[in-house]
């Protein structure tokens, strides 16, 4: 943005946090972390720490919002007041309302809504700590929480951002790059269906850079997809181990 | 933002689009008639009314003094708000802005902000203390589809039409003087939304066509043909190839409209 600002990428192409242009931040995913939710997941992506709980399919409240021909998917993206540098008011901001909508629309294509008429599913996303790219991490975790709840899905949805920092197109921007960079392109993707379910952008990119960023984000999504599937399997491996131990006792 | 239409009609619309045709006889990438009228609200510093077919959007710009944000002490402030006025459609209800009007406002906002359309540094009166705040209020008067493009175009038209009050500073107080200067603009972004129905991509969807749309994607495009903001919406998806196709479609149409509007 400003010429006087210090460079975010050094001459060797290494970013301020030590990553290469196409390198993801450290990623940790856990499934089934909330005892009361029907499905849940926890994600640590860089310094992002996000908890997602899924309730349903269940009866809609208020009832008049239910639809006779399909299930209603509701999503609330919410940031904890302590999740950012300056305290955020807990009341929903316009940004949170918009993100709740785009996250919901990113997940909807994965579900068979018409199979559960008159019901509703609620997805609650709580950002405990934010470090840039929270909408993407939320989608990755929310898809896992949905899978954890046992509802049939066409595919997991996985999300990752790419963007432009200084003069370079890079993968998975963290907070400083998001704020000081040139552009940010979050993408949500269903790898098995080759379907992009969320795409946003702010900043300025040429058409060529835009294409490159979208493709880079999709490649990032594919890498996270592997971690996502592993997290889901791990949960069942634990259950298997636990039941084996019990039967041995 | 939905209006109910019968299943038969839905099917008819989809079948037509699959054949590359549309109910009103347009081609898939044709826009409806576009009319812009500028400066019709005298009380506002800037205004424009845009008709896109029967979609009717009025934008008023008010300029007031206020405090800058702490992280941008020498820049003016842009605030965009959208009202889906209940008289515009049976599906609009009175009350605080809902999800769709917030999304609409934020798409319009992002197009103007990210293309750096307003020369914000020229809106600074006293760094860190006083700047001009530009309020862009989008007022939808009749909803017949494609509110995003209509609102974004109307907002930029209103900004082009906006006059800033002349002022002087006396003992730290801002005193408004006689006369006006035009709002300093650096860019005129054009927002184009591409809708997906089945496997077809089309532009400027009417209200009925929006009911059969799987998903949409909006691009804000500046004079150089660069993309400044993108937003996908709707419950469907795009393949990566469709995204590239859509962005090219949007760029062609933006260039065409830019010529037509003489922007």
Image (tube, coloured by chain):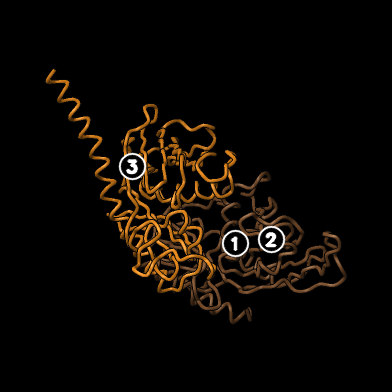
Q: Say what secondary structure mark 3 lies in.
A: helix
Which residue does the numbered mark 1 point to in the structure image?
Answer: B108
Residue at 40% across / 74% down in the picture? A208
Q: Chain A is drawn in which colour?
A: orange
Q: Where is residue B222 in the image (x, y as percent from the top left)?
A: 55, 74
Q: How crowded is mark 1: few (under 14 residues within 10 Å), some or many (20 or more)?
A: many
Q: Position of residue A160 (x, y in %)?
A: 37, 55
Q: Residues within 10 Å of mark 2 (few under 14, many from 20)?
A: many
Left or right, A134 with respect to A148, comes to right
The image quarter containing residue B214 is bottom left
Residue at 32% across / 53% down in the picture? A190
Q: Which mark is residue B148?
A: none
What is the residue that sits farthest to the top in this orientation?
A249
The residue lying toward the viewer, choosing from A163 and B98, is A163
Distance in Å between CA atoms under marks 2 and 1: 9 Å
Chain drawn brown in the picture: B
Q: Are marks 3 and 1 on the same chain?
A: no
Which residue does the numbered mark 3 point to in the structure image?
Answer: A144
Which residue does the numbered mark 2 point to in the structure image?
Answer: B136
Q: Do the residues labelled 2 and 1 touch (CB within 8 Å)?
A: yes
Q: Do the residues labelled 3 and 2 touch (CB within 8 Å)?
A: no
């Amino acid at each position: 943005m400003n010429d006087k600002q210090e460079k975010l990428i050094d001459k060797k192409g290494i970013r301020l946090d030590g990553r290469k242009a196409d390198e993801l931040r450290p990623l940790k995913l856990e499934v089934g972390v909330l005892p009361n939710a029907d499905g849940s997941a926890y994600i640590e992506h860089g310094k992002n720490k996000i908890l997602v709980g899924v309730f349903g399919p269940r009866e809609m409240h208020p009832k008049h919002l239910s639809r006779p021909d399909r299930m209603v998917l509701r999503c609330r993206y919410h940031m904890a007041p302590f999740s950012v540098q300056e305290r955020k008011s807990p009341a929903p901001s316009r940004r949170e309302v918009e993100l709740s909508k785009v996250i919901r629309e990113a997940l909807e294509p994965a579900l068979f809504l018409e199979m559960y008429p008159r019901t509703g599913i609620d997805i609650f996303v709580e950002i405990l700590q934010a470090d840039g790219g929270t909408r993407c991490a939320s989608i990755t975790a929310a898809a896992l929480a949905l899978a954890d709840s046992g509802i049939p899905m066409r595919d997991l949805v996985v999300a990752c951002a790419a963007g432009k920092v200084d003069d370079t197109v890079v993968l998975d921007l963290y907070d400083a790059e998001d704020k000081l960079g040139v552009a940010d392109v979050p993408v949500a993707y269903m790898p098995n269906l080759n379907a992009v379910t969320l795409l946003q952008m702010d900043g300025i990119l040429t058409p060529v850079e835009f294409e490159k960023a979208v493709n880079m984000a999709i490649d990032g999504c594919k890498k996270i997809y592997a971690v996502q599937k592993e997290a889901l399997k791990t949960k069942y491996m634990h259950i298997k181990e636990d039941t084996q131990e019990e039967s041995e006792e | 933002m939905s209006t109910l239409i019968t299943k038969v009609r839905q099917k008819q619309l989809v079948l037509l689009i699959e054949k590359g045709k549309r109910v009103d006889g347009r081609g898939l990438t044709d826009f409806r008639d576009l009319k812009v009228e500028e400066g019709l609200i005298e009380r506002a510093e800037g205004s424009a009314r845009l008709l896109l077919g029967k979609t009717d959007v009025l934008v008023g710009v008010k300029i007031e003094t206020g405090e800058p944000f702490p992280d941008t002490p020498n820049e003016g402030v842009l605030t965009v708000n959208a009202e889906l006025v209940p008289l515009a459609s049976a599906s609009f209800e009175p009350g605080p802005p809902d999800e769709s009007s917030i999304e609409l406002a934020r798409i319009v906002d992002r197009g103007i902000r990210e293309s750096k359309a307003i020369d914000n540094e020229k809106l600074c009166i006293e760094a860190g203390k006083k700047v001009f705040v530009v309020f862009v209020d989008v007022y939808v008067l009749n909803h017949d589809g494609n509110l995003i493009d209509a609102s974004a175009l109307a907002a930029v038209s209103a900004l082009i039409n906006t006059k800033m009050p002349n002022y002087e500073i006396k003992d730290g107080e801002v005193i408004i003087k006689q006369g006006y200067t035009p709002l300093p603009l650096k860019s005129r972004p054009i927002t184009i939304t591409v809708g997906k129905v089945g496997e077809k991509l089309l532009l400027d969807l009417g209200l009925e066509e929006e009911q059969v749309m799987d998903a949409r994607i909006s691009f804000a495009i500046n004079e150089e043909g660069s993309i400044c903001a993108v937003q996908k919406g709707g419950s469907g998806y795009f393949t990566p190839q469709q995204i590239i196709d859509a962005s090219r479609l949007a760029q062609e149409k933006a260039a065409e409209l830019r010529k037509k509007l003489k922007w």
